[in-house]
Amino acid sequence: DMHSILEWIRQEGIIFKGGSGAGVNLSRLRGLGEAMSGGGTASGPLSFMKAADAGAGAIKSGGKTRRAAKMIVWDIDHPDIQEFIWCKVREEEKARVLIAAGYSDGIDGEAYATVAFQNANNSVRVPDEFMRRATGGTSVETWATHWRTNPEHVADVFRASDLLRQIAEATHACGDPGMQFDDTMNIWHTV
């Protein structure tokens, strides 16, 4: 809910001020356009990522000049997964236009200060089943995304290999998103 989203951003700011880092999986947030209980539709997790990113940019880690250490994770079955995969590439393109127009190009320069999503590392969290479908040797294996308000309801269906290719292309373009291998991480976990 809105209270917990704003509390996340507040707590994250305090963590950054103390010189530490934070990570969050935003996959429980409703996708863009999903119905809200009080009426209207959700703005989607990207809108809150943008607000949290601006906060992280304003609060230098430990009051120093170093940027905050921040990680954002989304599950591959989130209805807005394509927007998440490409969000940093789109902002990189804006920065390049600003640099070409004469704005300074350093990581703390004017161009990057005016675009979003520069203060976090993004990762897509995938289960083994997704990887089997994406690399199974056939391009017809599908992967469904699901609404958060009703996980049984399919939001969209993609070729799994296409989603994996999009992740690779976006990562090649700007370094994000990375990947988290959900099942493997949990199987290898020592606790």
Image (cartoon, rainbow, N blue to C red):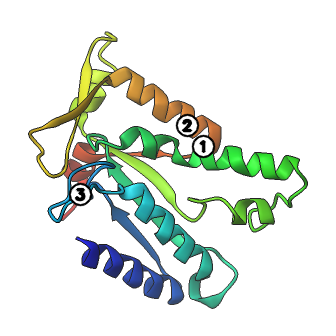
Residue flagged by tag 1: what amino acid is it? Val
Residue flagged by tag 3: what amino acid is it? Arg
In this view of the protein, which residue sits in the foreground, 140 or 5? 5
Question: Along the polypeptide, which appears first: circle 1 or circle 2?
Answer: 1
Quickly name the residue at label 3: 28
> Which label is found at residue 170?
2
Rendered view: 184 above or below 143: below
Q: Is mark 2 on a helix, strand or loop?
A: helix
Instruction: Report, in whole angstroms, how far the alpha carbon at label 1 lies from the one at label 3.
Output: 23 Å
Q: Is mark 1 on a helix, strand or loop?
A: helix
Residue drawn 12% across and 45% down? 151
In this view of the protein, which residue sits in the foreground, 137 or 16? 16
Instruction: Report, in whole angstroms, how far the alpha carbon at label 2 lies from the one at label 3.
Output: 23 Å
> Which label is found at residue 89?
1
Rendered view: 33 above or below 8: above
Q: Is mark 3 on a helix, strand or loop?
A: loop
Rendered view: 108 above or below 142: below
Instruction: Decide if residue 32 is in sight here.
Output: yes
The reply to whether discs 2 and 3 touch (Cβ–Cβ < 8 Å) is: no
Instruction: Report, in whole angstroms, how far the alpha carbon at label 1 lies from the one at label 2.
Output: 6 Å
Image x and y of residue 94, in percent: 70, 48
- Report which quarter residue 12 is drawn in: bottom left
